[in-house]
Amino acid sequence: MATLTLNINGASVTGPVEGRTLLVDFLRAAGLTGTHVGCETSQCGACTVHLDGAPVKACSVFAMECEGGAVTTIEGMADGDDLSPIQAAFKEHHGLQCGFCTPGMVMSAASLLKENPKPDEAAIRAHLEGNICRCTGYHNIVKAIMAASGQDVSAVAER
Ligand code: FES
Ligand code: FES
């Protein structure tokens, strides 16, 4: 058993790890259970976090590979009770139902808007290819991301 230190949401976090410990399991063991475990095979995107500013599926990264890195999880998105603009848009536009996929969707959306502040519908759908939602049909998720980027959502196609 080794010890790992990461900067998570701006705070230094140290904990025990084995060589096989996945980043998602390290985060959840640290009490950050907003990052969900779905498929554990890098397909569903429920475990998406940012590692050194880039989105990663935390079930596909060994925690020890991240030594000294900076991780942002869904818990780092809101400012206390104030939701981030993306979270607020998901709430307003009903971009979630059961909420299982939502942390990963929000983290993925945040990385998209960082690269492309005004993505069109096609760009949003393409970016979310690695995030699976079993509830919403994606329509309201796309709407929420367009709204978070300050765009008119009335033209988002119903599917
Ligand atoms: Fe990581 Fe599904 S749990 S991609
Ligand atoms: Fe249920 Fe997306 S809201 S899986």
Image: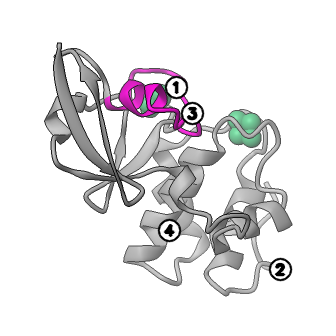
Horizontal relation, residue 99 to residue 114: left or right = right
Q: Residue at x 37, y 75 (%)?
A: 115
Name the kind of residue labelled 4 in the image.
Ala
Name the kind of residue labelled 2 in the image.
Ser
Front residue of 97 and 140: 97
Give the mark nearest the N terminus, 1 or 4. 1
Q: Which residue is mark 2?
A: 154
Which numbered dot is residue 123?
Answer: 4
Quarter-wise, where is residue 81 in the image? bottom right
Q: Can I make out residue 43 in this image?
A: no
Mark 3 or mark 2: which is in front?
3
| The C terminus: image quadrant | bottom right
Which numbered dot is residue 37?
Answer: 1
Whole-angstrom CA distance, mark 3 to mark 4, is 29 Å
Whole-angstrom CA distance, mark 1 to mark 4, is 26 Å
Horizontal relation, residue 142 to residue 42: left or right = right
Q: Range of the magenta residues?
A: 23-43
Horizontal relation, residue 83 to residue 125: left or right = right
Q: Residue at x 55, y 62 (%)?
A: 77
Give the mark nearest the N terminus, 3 or 2. 3
Front residue of 141 and 54: 54
Q: Can I make out residue 145 in this image?
A: yes
CB of mark 1 near ligand 1 (< 8 Å) = yes
Give the mark nearest the N terminus, 4 or 2. 4
Is the residue under label 3 in contact with that under label 1 (CB below 8 Å)?
no
Front residue of 151 and 81: 81
Name the kind of residue labelled 3 in the image.
Thr
Whole-angstrom CA distance, mark 2 to mark 1, is 33 Å
| The N terminus: image quadrant | top left
